[in-house]
């Protein structure tokens, strides 16, 4: 039974390089988005007016 669980765990869980790659992709996307929004005030205003805000 434990071999089945170990095999299933290896199939489901991503490896460390896969997790790091995804983290870098997300971080890169955030950095690109912040750069674009900081250089285009009209786009920043558009995003701000069309965003959904939740009350605290």
Image (cartoon, grey):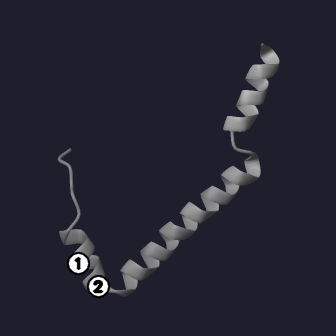
> Which of the 4 quarters of the picture holds residue 9?
top right
Give the farthest residue toward the right.
3
Label at residue 11: none
Q: x and y percent of residue 23 in the render?
A: 61, 57
Q: Is residue 54 above or below residue 29?
A: above
Q: Confirm or deny contact between disc 2 and disc 1 (CB under 8 A).
A: yes
Q: Is residue 38 above or below residue 31?
A: below
Q: Nearer the viewer, residue 3 or 45?
A: 3
Horizontally, residue 55 falls left or right of residue 2, namely: left
Residue under pointer 2: 41
Q: Is residue 27 above or below residue 45?
A: above
Residue at x 29% of width, y 85% of height: 41
Horizontally, residue 3 falls left or right of residue 25, namely: right
Q: Secondary structure at mark 1?
A: helix
Quadrant where the N terminus is found in the figure: top right
Residue at x 23% of width, y 78% of height: 45
Residue under pointer 1: 45
Residue at x 20% of width, y 44% of height: 56
Q: Nearer the viewer, residue 52 or 12?
A: 12
Residue at x 25% of width, y 85% of height: 42
Label 2 environment density (alpha carbons within 10 Å; few <14, some 14–19, many ≥20)? few
Label 1 environment density (alpha carbons within 10 Å; few <14, some 14–19, many ≥20)? few
> What is the total number of numbered labels drawn onto the structure image?
2
> Which of the 4 quarters of the picture holds residue 13?
top right
Q: Secondary structure at mark 2?
A: helix
Q: x and y percent of residue 37 in the render?
A: 37, 79
Q: Nearer the viewer, residue 19 or 55?
A: 19
């Amino acid at each position: 039974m434990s071999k089945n669980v170990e095999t299933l765990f290896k199939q489901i869980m991503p490896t460390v390089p896969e997790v790091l790659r995804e983290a870098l992709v997300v971080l890169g996307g955030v950095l690109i988005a912040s750069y674009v929004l900081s250089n285009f005030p009209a786009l920043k205003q558009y995003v701000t007016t069309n965003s959904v805000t939740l009350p605290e």
